[in-house]
Image (spheres, rainbow, N blue to C red):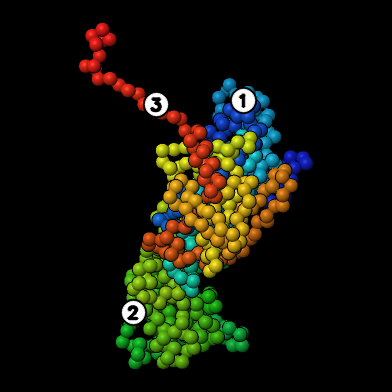
Amino acid sequence: MAAAKVNGQTKEGKRNCGIDGPTNPMVTPLLTDLYQFTMAYAYWKAGKHEERAVFDLYFRKNPFGGEYTVFAGLEECIKLIANFRIAEDEIAFIRASLPPSCEDGFYDYLRGVDCSNVEIHSISEGYVVFPKVPLMRIEGPIAVVQLLETPLLNLINYASLVATNAARHRFVAGKSKLLLEFGLRRAQGPDGGIGASKYSYMGGFDATSNVAAGKLFGIPLRGTHSHAFVSSFMSPDEITDKLLHSFDGSNACEDFVSLVQTWLRKLKRSHVLGGIFGETNQSELAAFTSYALAFPSNFLALVDTYDVMRSGIPNFCAVALALKDLGYKAVGIRLDSGDLAYLSCEARKFFQAIEKEFGVPDFGKTCITASNDLNEETLDALNKQGHQVDAFGIGTHLVTCYAQPALGGVFKLVEINNQPRIKLSEDVSKVSIPCKKRCYRLYGKEGYPLVDIMVGENEPPPKVGERILCRHPFNESKRAFVVPQHVEELLKCFWPGRSGKAREELPPIKLIRERCIKQLDQMRTDHMRRLNPTPYKVSVSAKLYDFIHFLWLNEAPCGRVAVKFPRHALSERDE
């Protein structure tokens, strides 16, 4: 964080609005591609560097074969922009990296570069977003805005991908299940681990195992113990301090180990449970007992080190019942291998039998957590098989975005000096939508979003109750009239530059998470489903449609048909 503060120094008379630097101190103006600096020099050399340009940051296709994306990463982008200054040692490195023919005046120019004349309009973080609609509109001197391209894409692409992945896992698991992010050890480095924890929480997960992310962002922490802890014990004789005070402090159990053994014998004598297990693994029992002595109010045991039903579950129950005698309530168990659907159901039956036979209220509702390389597909399969899992610990497939490694965001020039620009391609999906635009979400009478529409900056906005023609940007036959019951403007000013506009505040992550959950709840379920989701409509106004195709024809070179004569048609003299 120290480096971020150094980068966050501001010029005399300039302010960064009290916004801290980026979370990762490596996010500096040098976190960019070399060609951003080579273009900046070329702009400066041509005297174009101060020309006013507008860029759109958007993506072309939703990830994971779905039909929606969750927008994330905005806060880190604003932190970068608010503190964007190129330090002297960074300028020295840029000088050494560019050809020696670059003039000294360019480096003097870089010393004065900041984002005080840059204007950022963006969709709010945590919103559900769709292809082609600008997530962010960046307006300012072209050389400065060009320098922002790579870091902004870097900060948004992965963040949005992970948040979307988390939202998809939440949709399959259901609202009632607890989702825990356990992916730090499998993440792509420290930054990938921190980012995954932050944006998984934003996308709908409930907690993380990542202690650093908990400290940085206030995300709830969850975790118990590993198989190593269980297998590190040999027998209950290793436990020397056996004293455990009751929950209310009114009394103490001098030998908690003996109390656990007493309960295990009761379970073995049970007519209902006795036939399920015989002698349990005593080293496992020692590990559970020791952990309960350390954390009597947070006892959750990993029960699959040796045998789930013949050892892990009975041992857990013996310890949990001993804790109950002292006024504590065990949290539950974790299953990390085997047939999770079957084992969770059998464990639930075991807990319910104890509640019935020994009269322990709510013991049948003891929490069952499952882990073991889970993903969307396995969650869906568990739902179809029928299971009794209350919480899922998900790691590798979540944080690495195993099903799709990148979002594919792009950064395209749409206007310069008030002149609209377009990027053409033989692949229509890569044709950009020109000019400075305003974007709206139109809602139907049921409260669901119907369509996102882009209009020219100076066009009148859509109005509630008034019919508007929504056109596909490139397909002439795809069009529809919509009468919105509610209209929401999507792009808001998060960095006003010198425009004098009011700046939207950056909310804390918990509020962004709540916003994300609310956004997802507003979507029709057919847009959200895993298989064959219904595409959400993204459109342009009739006027913008006409202008796109006018500019397309105007900018596309007109080919010439050349007529070739067969060789035999030429005369001898022509040859």
Q: Which mark is residue 560?
A: 3
Expressed as whole percent of the image width and height from the top left, the position of residue 38 reads 56, 30
Q: Label 1, on which residue?
A: 45
What is the count of numbered marks? 3
Q: CA distance from mark 1 to mark 2?
A: 77 Å
Residue type at mark 1 is Lys
Q: Which mark is residue 458?
A: none
Mark yes or no: residue 185 visible: no
Residue type pointed to by label 3: Arg
Relative to 423, say whether 131 is above or below.
Answer: below
Choose mark 2 or mark 3, whichever is in front.
3
Residue at the far left: name it: 568
Q: Nearer the viewer, mark 1 or mark 3?
A: 3
Which one is in front, 119 or 306?
A: 119
Q: Nearer the viewer, residue 415 or 468?
A: 468
The percent coordinates of residue 289 (x first, y second) are 46, 78
Q: Mark 1 against mark 2, which lies toward the viewer?
A: 1
Question: Which residue occupies 25% across, 14% down?
Answer: 570
In what element is the residue under mark 1? helix
Q: Residue furthest top?
A: 573
Q: Amino acid at mark 2?
A: Arg
| Residue under label 2 | 310
Q: Is residue 352 left or right of residue 124?
A: left
Label 2 Cα crowd, 10 Å radius (few <14 / some 14-19 / many 20+): some
Q: Residues within 10 Å of mark 3 (few under 14, many from 20)?
A: few
Give the mark nearer the N terminus: 1 vs 2: 1
On screen, residue 201 above or below 405: below
Q: Secondary structure at mark 2?
A: helix
* Image spot of residue 395 (x, y percent): 44, 61
- For the C terminus, the quadrant is top left
Instruction: Please give the name of the residue rendered at 44% of the width and 47% of the height, measured from the top-left corner.
Output: 475
**How far apart are the two marked residues, 2 and 3, measured between alpha carbons?**
81 Å
